[in-house]
């Protein structure tokens, strides 16, 4: 299992557009990808679950990746977060 943390930089947080982009990105991998924030957790491939986390700018999220392609998925997702969120 791989894990990394990220502080959301997007002005409006993890809202519909970035949640959609993240869900699309997460579905590329065979590994299970979860996002956790403020005691709640969501599957990264589910837009509504991501939005339900209510993550705002400046809040930290913990991303966990477990599965056959976890090394590649974690590295590419970390880059995705830096570029999009």
Image (tube, helix red, strand yellow):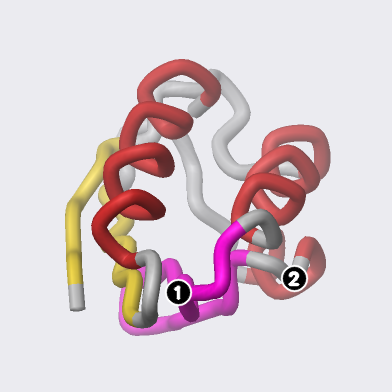
| x 50%, y 52%: residue | 55
Question: x, y (%) of residue 82?
Answer: 36, 23
Q: Left or right of 25: which side holds 67?
A: left
Displayed quadrant of residue 28 = bottom right
- Which quarter of the image is occupied by the N terminus? bottom left
Q: Nearer the viewer, residue 84 or 76?
A: 76
Q: Earlier in the sequence, mark 1 or mark 2?
A: 1
The residue indicated by pointer 2 is 46
Q: Residues within 10 Å of mark 2 (few under 14, many from 20)?
A: some
| x 55%, y 78%: residue | 42
- In the orientation shown, which residue stands out farthest toward the front? 68
- The range drawn in magenta is 29-44
- In the rendered structure, are the residues bearing label 1 and label 2 in contact, judged by CB atoms less than 8 Å apart? no
Q: Left or right of 41: which side holds 17?
A: right
Q: Nearer the viewer, residue 34 or 30?
A: 30
Q: Which mark is residue 79?
A: none
Q: Main secondary structure of the magenta part?
A: strand
The residue indicated by pointer 1 is 34
Q: Left or right of 59: which side holds 44?
A: right
Q: Is residue 10 above or below residue 37?
A: above
Q: Residues within 10 Å of mark 1 (few under 14, many from 20)?
A: many
Displayed quadrant of residue 84 = top right
What element does badge 1 sit on?
strand
Magenta stretch: residue 64 in it? no
Question: x, y (%) of residue 21?
Answer: 73, 38
What element does badge 2 sit on?
loop
Label 1, label 2: how far apart the Cα atoms are: 10 Å
| x 61%, y 28%: residue | 12
């Amino acid at each position: 299992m791989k894990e990394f943390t990220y502080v959301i930089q997007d002005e409006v947080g993890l809202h519909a557009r970035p949640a959609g982009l993240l869900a699309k990105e997460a579905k590329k991998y065979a590994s299970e990808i979860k996002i956790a924030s403020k005691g709640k957790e969501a599957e990264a491939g589910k837009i509504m679950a991501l939005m339900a986390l209510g993550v705002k700018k400046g809040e930290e999220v913990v991303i966990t990746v477990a599965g056959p392609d976890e090394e590649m998925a974690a590295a590419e997702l970390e880059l995705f977060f830096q570029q999009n969120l």
